[in-house]
Image (spheres, rainbow, N blue to C red):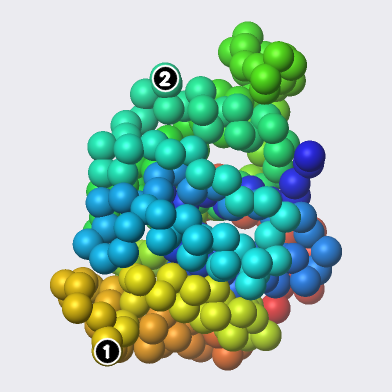
Amino acid sequence: MKLDILVFGAHPDDAELGAGGTIAKEIALGKKVGIIDLTRGELGTRGSAEIRDVEAADAAKILGVTVRENLKFKDGFFVNDENHQMEVIKAIRKYRPETVLCNAIDDRHIDHGKGSKLVSDACFLSGLRRIETKLGEVHQQEWRPKLVYHYIQWKNLKPDFVVDISDYIISKTNAIKAYTSQFHDPNSSEPETPISSKTFIESVHYRAKDLGRLVGVDYGEGFTVERMVAVKSLDSLI
């Protein structure tokens, strides 16, 4: 199955928090989008891996993604080595996306930066035909995505471009709220975390509003790039 966009996240909910509005928008525009979670988030303070499996599936339905998979790397301890790169390469070659979205290049959680570099390196290596991989018994063909973008997460990194998600902020919010174990629940007896506070969802909206303000729209999501962005003409910008 070929996808237009493949979104990677170190943990279930990374894709929704960083790029949920963009995912919903691209799907509405007719693109086929998939999500691949690197880990099950089993080290998370709240909930469990099993609960997050269900939540991730619910969030995928809300966004309308074509497929969602989990590579089941070890939360907190996966590394950017050959074994992990090969698994990501297999996923890239399986779905052959034109565009890949992945974690922030630098962030509060150590897995985000690691996941960012791992996916970026795998995108390059996936285009080398002498690296051989198989899907089942079928040999995979090399494939290199044309574009790799990194969504912004906890840290307030300066984006290289902003996507207008004004019409999709509700879809983004609903997908985030699918992770009921992770966010504020007044009836929960589990320990509080930075993202379970009463104001966290508000902070997600605030950032989207602020990014939108900077580019003249209501809500935005920011991304950083690995190579310079080109435009077809001056009037293709908003």
Disc 2 on helix, strand or loop? helix
Q: Which residue is drawn at 70% across and 78% down?
A: 238
- Viewport quadrant of the N terminus: top right
Res 220 visible: no
Disc on res. 82: 2
Q: Where is residue 53 in the image (x, y as percent from the top left)?
A: 47, 56
Q: Residue at x 37, y 53 (%)?
A: 49
Circles 1, 2 touching at the beta carbon (< 8 Å): no
**Residue 95 sits above or below residue 170 on the image:** above
User: Nearer the observer, disc 1 or disc 2?
Assistant: 1
- Residue farthest to the right? 30
Left or right of 57? Residue 208 is: left
Amino acid type at circle 2 is Glu
**Residue 34 sits above or below residue 140 on the image:** below
Circle 1: is it few (<14), some (14-19), or many (20+) Cα within 10 Å? few
- Residue farthest to the top? 130
Q: Distance between the residues labelled 1 and 2?
A: 44 Å
Going from N to C along the chain, the mark reached first, 1 or 2, is 2
**Residue 184 sits above or below residue 65 on the image:** below
Q: Residue at x 62, y 12 (%)?
A: 132
Q: Nearer the viewer, residue 37 or 106?
A: 37
Left or right of 174? Residue 142 is: right
Left or right of 216? Residue 138 is: right
Amino acid type at circle 1 is Pro
Q: Where is residue 177 in the image (x, y as percent from the top left)?
A: 47, 78
Disc 1 marks which residue?
A: 186
Left or right of 214? Residue 168 is: right
Res 54 visible: yes
Q: Position of residue 105 (x, y in %)?
A: 38, 50
